Amino acid sequence: MTLPAARLARALAAPEAGWTTRADAVVVGSGIAGLTAALELRTRVPRVLLVTKGKLSSGSTVWAQGGIAAALDPQDTPEAHLQDTLAAGGGLSDHDAVKVLVTEGPERVRELVARGAVFDAGPGGDIALTREGGHRADRIAHAGGDATGAEISRALVAQIEAVRDDPGIEVVEHALVLDVLTSAPTGGGVRRVAGVTLHVRGEGSRDGVGAVLAPVVILATGGIGQVFRSSTNPAGATGDGIAAALRAGAVIGDLEFVQFHPTVLWLGTGAKGQLPLISEAVRGEGALLLDVDGHRFMPGVHEMAELAPRDVVAHAIVRQMAATSADSVLLDVRHLGRRFLAGRFPTITRRLAELGIDWSEEPVPVAPAQHYHSGGVVTDLTGRSSVPGLYAVGEVACTGVHGANRLASNSLLEGLVFAQRAAHDVAERYAAGNLSDAPEPAARPGGTGLVAAVARSRVQKAMSDGSGVIRTASSLARTDERLAAVRSDAHVAAEVVAQPQAAEWETTNVHQVARALTRAAWLRTESRGGHFRADHPQPDPDWERRVLVGLDDDGALRVR
């Protein structure tokens, strides 16, 4: 069985740039990775432009509940953290990348504290540490009980706000990056980064579509949650960075490894969009998983029971739901007590109360939903992609740290560690005179594309039905066929209402990521980490390798 040829646009259909500016580096995204990169670059290159899709404080980091993992306890070691990370990664984590993460991580967290982040403290005044699934030591630092991301975001945004009038940095809010600009190919056929085009929604001289010319672009755009019907990701997580990098010629990897968080609040069959997450830290504190008959099922699945890696828990929940003909399972925390729950998890407690649920008195219905993406733009240990001048950090990147499955709370740490490494690499190249002015942008072959915004729900349903938690060759082929039927031409048929605007550009990104992810999942004929194939339910040693995705000059989608 083979899939028919697929072709994607090499650029979004958009108006010509109405304004142009220049920078030495463009950072796209305002989560932990983007903010860290911008702060590190500000004093190291003359001019940094930080672009964010919403407000400066609206990055995905703010939604992170559980915490940030690092070997901060004197009884813990980076080596132990490395082993736990490798175990969760299902044999596909890059050892060198993980070593960088766990070795540099503790110092980066201390620097985060120096930048104003306030973590919860233990009785002795040191940072309080807890445990989450897959960790064999207490190494999760948290803030505000279950508001770690919000506190980290607050501290980093405050640092940016403090220097916002500095002429060396400019922040552009409410700006959607459309495409990464590239140069004409050199003698070796290599296209270099020349900047970005973006659409600014707001008032002033930079309304509408414009171009920022720069020799370096650092993508820190977050995840792909809105590719699926149900996700814990914010509405802006439409895969913009991966899609833009793909169109620019970058190599993308591990797309098939999508982490479905096992315990997302079940709000009924009609629920869609961003759903409330019940943090993994809740299970770290002793929560139990029960099926609808009140049976605790995880001890028979894994030696770590409820603290097993997320993919193990998510698959077990799906199987238990099928066995009991139920739409959810139950998370039972009643034994932890009202006072503890309100103190340790105030955000979750308040959100559940808003929905009429008192989890100190009744079990909470939960089911898996898309949460994190282990794949992305393939980078080296300094964040460099295959396109010269293009970097990726945070969730949009594929550093090799996560492999087939992210270990709990390693995501914030990855964004922190590799954003600093990328920024320092750019600064070193600039100081050495290896970063000149941006090359002249040149049109890429392959044409432009646009998908009508109204098609997004159709794409999301196809992905959730066939490329979701459990996949088969036939389900993936059906998904691919349904995605291929979505019109993505630059000149959409007259009867289809699609104009170059934010909703259409985002939907085009969703569609392109969906097509590439589905093809990668179809090719990997095994089950490993966040990729589960019911027709190939076991890991295959022959598949201890990465699936890479790219576009030819004519836009042909290549998966290898």
Image: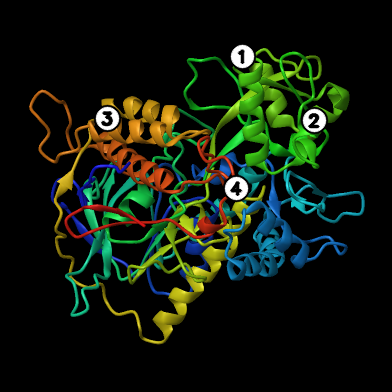
34 versus 258 height, above or below: below
Residue type at mark 4?
A: Arg
The residue carrying pointer 2 sits among few (fewer than 14), some (14 to 19) or many (20 or more) residues within 10 Å by Cα, namely some
Between discs 2 and 3, the one toward the N terminus: 2
Residue in view at x 20 percent, y 39 percent:
450
Marks 2/3: CA distance? 40 Å
Residue type at mark 3?
A: Ala
85 versus 146 height, above or below: below
What residue did someone put label 3 on? 453
The residue carrying pointer 1 sits among few (fewer than 14), some (14 to 19) or many (20 or more) residues within 10 Å by Cα, namely few
Give the mark toward the camera: 2 or 3.
2
What residue did someone put label 2 on? 287
Assess whether mark 3 and mark 4 are in contact (beta carbons under 8 angstroms): no
Between discs 1 and 3, the one toward the N terminus: 1
Give the mark toward the camera: 1 or 4.
1
Q: Within the image, what quadrant is residue 387 found in?
A: bottom left
Task: Report the side of 297 relative to 275 (left or right).
Answer: right
What residue did someone put label 4 on? 154
- Residue 351 in view in this figure: no
Between discs 4 and 3, the one toward the N terminus: 4
The residue carrying pointer 4 sits among few (fewer than 14), some (14 to 19) or many (20 or more) residues within 10 Å by Cα, namely some
Q: Residue 530: where, in percent of width, then height? A: 56, 43
Give the mark toward the camera: 1 or 2.
1
Assess whether mark 3 and mark 1 are in contact (beta carbons under 8 angstroms): no
Marks 1/3: CA distance? 35 Å
